[in-house]
Image (cartoon, grey):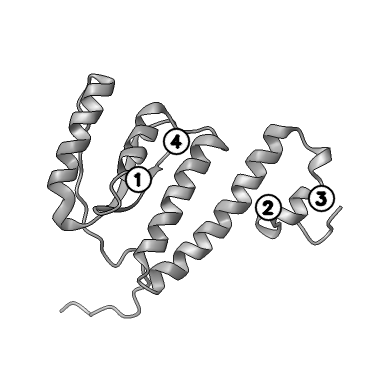
Amino acid sequence: HHPHIHSLRDADVKSLESVKQFLDEDTFIKCRYIIQEIDRVQRAAKFLRANDLKNFGQLMYETHWSLSKDYEVSCAESDLLVTIAGENPEAVLGARQTGGGFGGCIIVLIKKVSVKEFSSMVRKKYVATFKKEPDFYSINLSEGVHEITSLMAST
């Protein structure tokens, strides 16, 4: 139907909508998730380059809820943690499940001054709901993957 589209990376939601009648509902929803996630990643990169953490955080929430509802790879524990994060906009800019899906880890973009208080509150709600302790890991961002353009010779 669209000879220029070779993968979902080449598609947009409008082109997907035009072939919806040929897809079962689950396939359509999963394809739409992928197309939308590609767009979110591209927008996220722009927001990060502009140091726009507020909009970046909103994309984190969008990704999580799409993973949960559309791609169906979340769980009650992950959804609760992201819900709690979203209820605290004064401390948290964004949150989402990360990793392989079906639980695991939530990454939370939180103001440094709020970490201790927020973690304590999350622990209480999590234990009250699931009767088990969550683990918390603080991370420091680094330059990440980058090209090394020169090496010093050792003597």
Under mark 3, the amino acid is Ser
Name the residue carrying label 3: 18
Name the residue carrying label 4: 101
Q: Residues within 10 Å of mark 2 (few under 14, many from 20)?
A: some
Under mark 2, the amino acid is Leu
Name the residue carrying label 1: 86
Tag nearer the camera, 1 or 4: 1
Compare marks 1 and 4 and give the one earlier in the sequence. 1
113 to the left or right of 21: left
Q: Residues within 10 Å of mark 3 (few under 14, many from 20)?
A: few
Kindly state the secondary structure of the residue where label 4 is placed.
loop
Q: How far apart are marks 2 and 1 (CA)?
A: 30 Å
Q: How far apart are marks 1 and 4 (CA)?
A: 20 Å
Marks counted in the figure total 4
Kindly state the secondary structure of the residue where label 3 is placed.
loop
- Picture quarter containing residue 96? top left
Compare marks 2 and 3 and give the one earlier in the sequence. 2
25 to the left or right of 96: right
* Above-or-below relation of 106 to 90: above
